[in-house]
Amino acid sequence: MVAKGKDKAKKRKVKPSDYELRTTICGILKEVDFNTVTFTDILKLLVQRFDTDLTPRKLSTKLMIQEELTKLADDEDGEEDGEKDGAQSAGQELEA
């Protein structure tokens, strides 16, 4: 009977922490094509990477993905704004 308990312990998978999940989400988002990837695709990739069922954490995982997508979009907008500001500054210098 002791052997059965050990087998169950081996089969039980360690759930990833929020930090591990968020870090992995960031890595996945850097690799995927935003034009074709879906939330379900990202969730499947997470399940494969952690080899565990993330269904109980589906809502929190979705929120993490949305937050990271927002950060990426904000970073991209910030870079574009910086380029526009740089172009305007250069244009002003040429006019003077």
Image: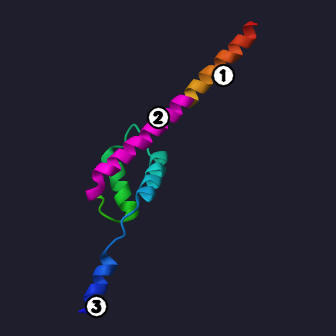
Type of amino acid under label 1:
Gly
Dominant secondary structure (helix, strand or loop) of the stretch shown in magenta? helix
Q: Is residue 9 left or right of residue 72?
A: left
Q: Of the numbered discs in the image, which one, if any, rests on residue 50?
A: none
Q: Which residue is mark 2?
A: 73
Cα distance, mark 3 to mark 1? Answer: 68 Å
Q: Residue at x 73, y 7 (%)?
A: 95
Cα distance, mark 2 to mark 1? Answer: 20 Å
Number of marks present in the image shown: 3
Seen from this angle, which residue lies furthest bottom? 1
Q: Look at the picture and state if 1 lies above or below 66.
A: below
The one of 45 and 9 positioned closer to us in this rendering: 9
Give coordinates of residue 80: x percent, y percent. 56, 27
Give coordinates of residue 56: x percent, y percent. 26, 58
For label 2, the SS is: helix
Type of amino acid under label 2:
Ala
Q: Look at the picture and state if 4 lies above or below 35.
A: below
Q: Of the numbered discs in the image, which one, if any, rests on residue 86?
A: 1
Seen from this angle, which residue lies furthest right? 96
| Residue 14 is inside the magenta segment | no
The one of 74 and 80 positioned closer to us in this rendering: 74
The span shown in magenta is 55-78
Q: Which residue is mark 3?
A: 3
